[in-house]
Image (cartoon, grey):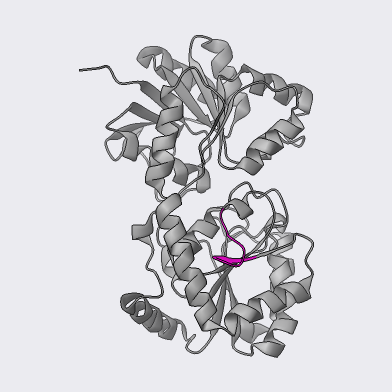
Amino acid sequence: MSVQHKVAVITPGVFVIPSGRSSSVERVIEKIVPLMAAELDLRVFGRSAGQFPAKGYLGSVPCCRIAGGSSYLPGILRHLRNWMPDTADVHNRPALAYGLKRQLPQLHVQLSLHSTTFISPACFPASKALPMLQAMDGLIVNSNYLRDEVQMRFPQLRTPIAVNPLGVSLEDFIPRWTPAGEAVRKARLADYGWQDRKIILFVGRLIPSKGVHRILEALPALIEREKDALIVMVGSAFYGVNKETAYVHKLRQMADTYPNHTVFLPYIPYPQIADMYNLADVVVVPSMDDEAFGLVNLEAMASGIPVVASRVGGIPEIVKDGETGLLLPGSSDAQVWADSLALLLSHEDLCRSMGLRGRELARSQFRWQHTAQRWADVIRDTRTPELSLL
């Protein structure tokens, strides 16, 4: 029997794995790691919290929970020196990955970047970020956009970059356009008192870059054409914490003008959030810029719901304009958003056909099984060739 490749999956974000609360980073790990437990010898290293024991399990995969702050890197190093993995896959924290590589130069270190957040000038000047990225044995990113962005920001970078799109669990989402889906939808709309409303759903953080204000700006023109339109905004400024920021306050002030057409719901963790998609006629993703991937797009498609989204970042790699939804230029004004939403809300057959095509695209190309297998192939190939795994 061959010896399995030993992989330390390291996630220094603020959420405990598994805990039922997460950002998209933890969700990726929670979805792909158990799928590869039979092919790789895996351990997850994450943050600890007082209410959780020091060790847990993600399926059959051990999860070691380590205190954060300045003790996190030393704690990780102690575990890795004892276990001696072949590869460490560090998620979204180049400084931590760099620290591991400096302390354990023989260790094959991959950095999985989920966004540009931690390679931006706000975190590190390019003169500091470049040596961190150069020290890696390989980078894994979730879109061609993110790969190109990394290469544009760091033209001297020679570290191989693999592109591995994210996925979705179809079984977690009830597709709307089925007898069962419509029955569930009808009952739940009645529970909310939203019968006969046309639901525009936003799911995500309430921060300026997500562009929620664009949809509220479009609302006056939209309700002139669709008097039953209702914008349902699910989320908060911070993952799992419903704290009101200045931006959230501004959104609420905008919405107060149209109280019968706007609803704010707090952050809903995964997978419970899947229930909200079934209620929607349209899912809106009005991101301003820098959206590396956008799991919301896939979750809408898995639910059979068309998407109206900004043509920015990696979103066009997921949403097919005119087929599974509508893509609008990033500079589009409120009238363009209103017209596009009204088009779909007034044509149920178009919503249905786009939704069904989106569901099929998610099934055939964007399942977590696909993401997990590609990830494992990169991890096992310690030569780190430059790969595009689309």
- In depth, the one of 185 and 175 nearer the eye is 175
Quarter holding the N terminus is top left
Please tell me in which quadrant of the rendered image residue 332 appears: bottom right
267 or 286, nearer to the observer: 286
From the viewer's perspective, tell me whether residue 336 is left or right of residue 197.
right
Picture coordinates of residue 40, whole percent (x, y): 33, 27
Q: Is any atom of residue 345 visible in this view?
A: yes
Horizontal placement of 116 versus 351: left or right?
Answer: right
Does the magenta run of residues contain 321? yes
Looking at this view, name the residue that lies furthest to the left: 1
* In magenta stretch: residue 340: no
**In the displayed structure, would residue 87 be above or below residue 230?**
above
Q: Residue at x 37, y 68 (%)?
A: 174
Magenta portion: prevailing SS class:
loop
Residue 257 visible in rendering: no
Q: How many marks?
A: 0
Q: Position of residue 354 (x, y in %)?
A: 51, 70
Toward which corner of the image does residue 169 lie, by quadrant? bottom left
Residue 226 versus residue 385 in the image, above or below: below
Q: Is residue 365 left or right of residue 137?
A: left
Q: From the viewer's perspective, is residue 126 above or below residue 279?
A: above
> Who is closer to the viewer here, 239 or 7?
7
Q: Residue furthest toward the top?
A: 106
Q: Position of residue 350 (x, y in %)?
A: 54, 78
**Residue 212 or residue 382, whichever sits in front:** 382
The span picked out in magenta is: 318-326
Residue at screen point 62% across, 22% down: 159
Question: Does residue 157 appear left or right of residue 82 in this picture?
Answer: right
In this picture, is 171 found above or below 252?
A: above
